[in-house]
Amino acid sequence: MKIKLFKTGILSLSTLVLFACSNIDDRLNVKNSWCAEEEEPKTIEILELSSDAMFVYNGSKVTDLLPEGQQKLQELILILQDDYTSISQITITGHTDRIGSDNYNDKLGLDRATAVKAYLIDHGLDATYIIETKGKREPVTSSCVGNKATAELKACLAPDRRVVLDIEGIKE
């Protein structure tokens, strides 16, 4: 009989340990050292910024940011600081239009993404950053005609020139 009680006692204790973390009423404010910290759900938010509104044409440095571009980034920083309790990662991807070579556009997209990263860091947005370029490989336009860099074609291709930010973090 003692053996049965002993086995039952072990089973009850192990059951208590296994389920104690999930069954504790939050109102009791009990923290057990063996319980893993509950992770808050992470949110991924995708924000798209037009490069035309941010940079001078063909510009890619922080000094090439237009006043409107700086204002957009400043507004973005305030929104992220207000809406997120923490930001774990920001992926910044630069996109270009189809005018120019693949190599030129890859470098331009990467340089623009790097400039946006530098601006965000300089203005206090702390996170892990990943910088990417898609160059001209992912256009959003499909009806622009021509290959010569005319003013009309540049205007038509403007939506392709953009910087996309994927924000991963915990929202308030």
Image: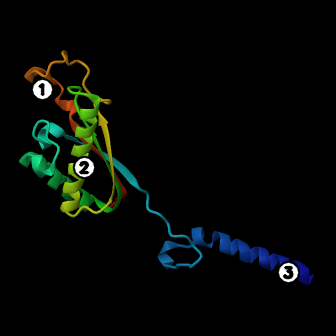
Q: Earlier in the sequence, mark 1 or mark 3?
A: 3
Q: Residues within 10 Å of mark 1 (few under 14, many from 20)?
A: few
Quarter where residue 93 is shown? top left
Q: CA distance from mark 1 to mark 3?
A: 82 Å
Residue 155, label in figure = 1
- Marks 2/1: CA–CA distance: 24 Å
Foreground of the two, 119 or 15: 119
Up the image or down, 97 lies above or below 6; here it is: above
Comparing labels 3 and 2, the label whose residue is closer to the camera: 2
**Nearer to me, 30 or 143:** 143
- Report the residue marked by disc 3: 5
Q: What residue is shown at x 19% (from left), y 55% (from top)? A: 119
Whether residue 127 sits left or right of residue 9 in the image: it is left
Vertical comparison of 140 with 129: above or below: above
Residue at point 24% right, 42% down?
163
- The residue wearing badge 2 is 114
Q: Amino acid at mark 2?
A: Thr
